Image (cartoon, helix red, strand yellow):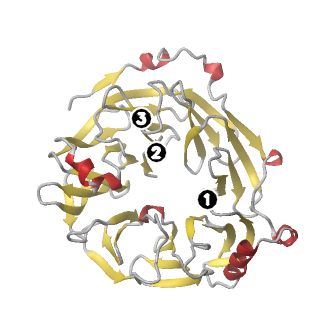
Amino acid sequence: MNRRAWLVGGMCVLLVAAGAVAYARSRDSCGEAVTSLSAAKSSSPFLDAQERARQPDENRDTLVETLAGDPAPIGAVVGAVGYHYEQWAQVSSYAQGIGVRTRDNPDFTMLDDTTLEPRWSVQVDTKRSAYDASDERYLVATMPAGTAPDLVALDADSGHRRWCTHLGGGVVHAADQFATQFLEDQGVAVLGPGSGSRERVVRLSGEDGSQTWARSLDADSGDFLGDLGDGTLLAGGRAQFELFDPASMGERKEGVSLVLLRSKDGSTVWKRSEPAGSDVHVVGTDPDAGIAVVQQWDGSSRTARLTAIDREGNDVWSVVPSPGKPFDAALRAGRVLVRAEEQWSAYDLGDGHRLWRRSVPARPQFLPYGFELDSVPLLDADHALIGGTTALHTLDLGTGEMTDAALPTDGINTTYWPYQLAVTDGLIAIATNTGAVVVRRE
């Protein structure tokens, strides 16, 4: 699973022993800000039908009523909660079910994929924190104000702590890049700030969280860390919004844009550089295919390209999907989705040929403010679910066709606009501006 960085050549290998003395805190204090709670001590914000009847909420109940009449993949309503804007409910998907936290609250609850009842929860006492997950583990990275993070690995089924480690290095500030990538042994690779303008990449053991290796390197802006397959990790690039920001790109000097590392020992496989004023944003990686997809800005021609790079560092294909316009992109199940204003298209990951192209309506506004393709969840290998302003759209990745499941509308108001979707094997969670609903998948 590719992991984007959280905002929160010439390399030197750091001795593993150095990590053992890089902090003065005792190992017994590790993860003291993280507390796991059992199902019996956890709660869910979602109300069932009887609870909703006792606590009526006009906007929430209108959303529930509309979804209850929608076609597949929307099924029976399991739970719902109402609130007043501010994106209060934050939902995410896991092998175990739906995860939920509330705005500005680092605490997290795992809800069962069948019952929607809590399986476990975790309390985090630092103001800032970051999270990642595999099918087997849930990872919490605390972000203390005065010390380096602690990383706490929990069993994703039960919430029981498996290990904790002090990451070492320096404090991770709010503006610093921070990314994690789970590995095959349930170990974790971590990219964070290093000394000066460099980044630091560390591999932690899946057995006990101990440090396997650490490296200091130049990984461009350190926006991305992801698995490229065959025991390799791709690091580097910059945030997408910076790629299309003339001021940001005007300050970009010639230098490294991407680095491929061997996950076993952190050694360099290859480095890729870009000239001054040019750079890349990593859209995603496909470990099985051994291909990374990047958005590439050429400062000399002022052209934005979509480029696929193989595990050897060679360009596989490159296209200009929207001449003269910035574009959004996401890698989904062997296709690269592209959106440029009202124009949508998809490209085959293997050879870059365009599979389809279509337009969506300009009026009424088709997508909520702030929508990004990278947020689109898959329903299966051939279909994705898109949260539009008037409907949930099931997109056929092979043809571009869409089928709709209606959302309530409120004139020009944004009352029912969705800002987050989460899809599991059994459930779909829809978080809108005034309420979140969980339904069965059909």
The residue at which mark 1 appears reads as 86
Residue 159 shows in the view: no
Ranked by sequence position, the earlier of labels 1 and 2 is 2
Q: Nearer the viewer, mark 1 or mark 2?
A: 1
Q: How many marks?
A: 3
Instruction: Name which residue type carries label 1.
Output: Glu
- SS at mark 2 in the image: strand
Tell me how far mark 3 sits from mark 2, CA to CA.
9 Å
Instruction: Name which residue type carries label 2.
Output: Trp
Callouts 1 and 2 close, C-beta under 8 Å: no
The residue at which mark 3 appears reads as 192
Q: Where 100 falls versus 158 (above or below)? A: below
The C terminus appears in which quarter of the rendering?
Answer: bottom right
Instruction: Name which residue type carries label 3.
Output: Gly
Q: Where 316 falls versus 225 (above or below)? A: below
The residue at which mark 2 appears reads as 6
Tell me how far mark 1 sits from mark 2, CA to CA.
21 Å
